[in-house]
Image (cartoon, rainbow, N blue to C red):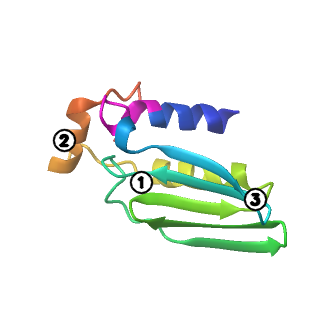
């Protein structure tokens, strides 16, 4: 449940009256069987951060991939891999928190319009 709370907080922190109308998060099932998770990072502090593709193939039902494509972190995985996909995205965001002390027009513009609910960036 902690990952759902984290995802809720991340989503809410990006809602500024505009972003949520254009972007967001989707979680769908696929017929492999499995999950498809898409987190849109356009117009967020993570838009310009590199994400290395991840591919894991353990068994027919225990697999996943995650990649950054078209402004999304796009993941798919087996029926029990949704939690692991969320963990990967959370870890990537935690390891790549933008340094807001650095002059960056993109991040400054985002920060002006959003409340980050106690999220602290170093």
Q: CA distance from mark 3 to mark 1?
A: 28 Å
Along the polypeptide, which appears first: circle 3 or circle 2? 3
Q: Secondary structure at mark 1?
A: loop
Marks 3 and 1 close (CB-CB < 8 Å): no
Work out which quarter of the rendered image holds the C terminus and state it: top left
The foreground one among 96 and 7 is 7
**Residue pointed to by mark 3:** 34
- Residue 76 in the image: state x and y as whole percent: 65, 62
Is 16 covered by the magenta stretch?
Answer: yes
Quadrant hosting residue 22: top left
Q: Is residue 90 visible?
A: yes
Along the polypeptide, which appears first: circle 1 or circle 2? 1
**Residue pointed to by mark 1:** 96
Q: Is residue 120 visible?
A: no
Q: CA distance from mark 3 to mark 2?
A: 38 Å
**Residue pointed to by mark 2:** 108
The magenta stretch spans which residues? 12-19
Left/right placement of residue 46 relative to residue 56 reads left
- Residue 86 in the image: state x and y as whole percent: 62, 49
- Closer to viewer: mark 3 or mark 1: 3
The foreground one among 44 and 79 is 79
- Residue 62 in the image: state x and y as whole percent: 81, 65
Along the polypeptide, which appears first: circle 3 or circle 1? 3
Left/right placement of residue 5 relative to residue 71 reads right
Q: CA distance from mark 1 to mark 2?
A: 17 Å
Q: How many marks?
A: 3
Q: Secondary structure at mark 3?
A: strand
Rendered residue at 39%/36% (across/down):
20
- Residue 26 in the image: state x and y as whole percent: 56, 47
């Amino acid at each position: 449940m902690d990952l759902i709370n984290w995802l809720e907080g991340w989503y809410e922190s990006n809602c500024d009256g505009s972003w949520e109308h254009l972007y967001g998060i989707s979680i769908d099932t696929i017929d492999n069987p499995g999950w498809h998770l898409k987190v849109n990072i356009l117009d967020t502090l993570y838009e310009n951060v590199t994400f290395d593709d991840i591919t894991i193939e353990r068994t027919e039902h225990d697999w996943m991939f995650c990649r950054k494509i078209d402004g999304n972190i796009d993941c798919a995985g087996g029926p029990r891999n949704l939690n692991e996909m969320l963990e990967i995205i959370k870890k990537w965001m935690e390891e790549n928190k933008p340094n807001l002390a650095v002059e960056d027009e993109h991040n400054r513009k985002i920060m002006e319009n959003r409340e980050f609910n106690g999220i602290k960036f170093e």
